[in-house]
Amino acid sequence: MMKHIILILGLIGLIVSCHYEKPGYYEGDSYVQMWRGENAVGVDSGMSVVSPQKNNYITVSKSKLQDTAWFIVHAMGHPSSGARQVMFEQYSVGEESGYLEAVPDVNFVPFGEPGLMERMVIPADTALAHIPVVVKYDPSPESAGKSFHLYVRLVPTEDFGVTTFGWTRGCVTFTNSAY
């Protein structure tokens, strides 16, 4: 008899718990991180750094004045029926043997440029976007034949916070050809 009572109470508990469990909307904030594909490289001050999905190593020259590296960015949280802004900023890791630090408006297009800002969005109803980082040829003799690292990280915007549990940093490696 006791087995039957326990069985009945167990079944009632299951029915009640399933009855009140309703799928709801995500209640937290929206966050953004870099996509963790096959493009993780190196170490940056103890943190993994993501390389661009395409053009991991770029050469710019007199005949190729600029090139674009594309980072895949992943949105998490609330879905949106409109495009949402993503933003990068450059950061420094200090001196590195064999590499110079890229200079805004000389070696790359600054991230606040209006033409670039239009492309730094995650489109409506999607969770992944390709975000551009445009590197430029520098004709100065000091840059000829030199290699550069451009370290970027995601920063919070009105649309997104930056996750603390995902990859938020990346690095573009490029050479300013002497030819």
Image (spheres, helix red, strand yellow):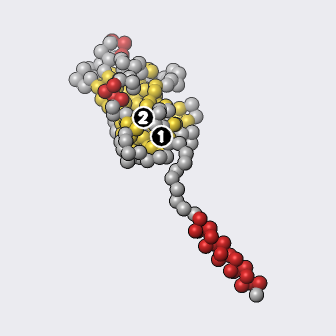
CA separation, marks 2 and 1? 8 Å
The vertical placement of 118 against 178, above or below, is below
Kindly give the residue lying farthest to the top in the view shown: 141
Kind of element beneath mark 1? strand
Q: Position of residue 113 (x, y in %)?
A: 35, 23
Contact (Cβ within 8 Å) of mark 2 with mark 1:
yes
Q: Amino acid at mark 1?
A: Val
For the N terminus, give its image quadrant. Answer: bottom right
Q: Is residue 105 left or right of residue 32?
A: left
The vertical placement of 86 against 144, above or below, is below
Q: Residue at x 36, y 18 (%)?
A: 105
Kindly give the residue lying farthest to the right in the view shown: 2
Q: Residues within 10 Å of mark 1 (few under 14, many from 20)?
A: many
Q: Nearer the viewer, residue 53 or 110?
A: 110
Q: Which mark is residue 32?
A: 1
Q: Residue at x 26, y 23 (%)?
A: 65
Q: Position of residue 84 (x, y in %)?
A: 40, 38
Return the disc, 2 or 1, that comes first in the chain's sequence: 1
Q: Nearer the viewer, residue 149 or 75?
A: 75
Q: Residue at x 52, y 50 (%)?
A: 26
Q: Residue at x 77, y 84 (%)?
A: 2
Q: Which mark is residue 86?
A: 2
Kind of element beneath mark 2? loop
Asked whether residue 177 appears in the rendered view, the answer is no
Q: Position of residue 22 (x, y in %)?
A: 54, 62
How many numbered marks appear? 2
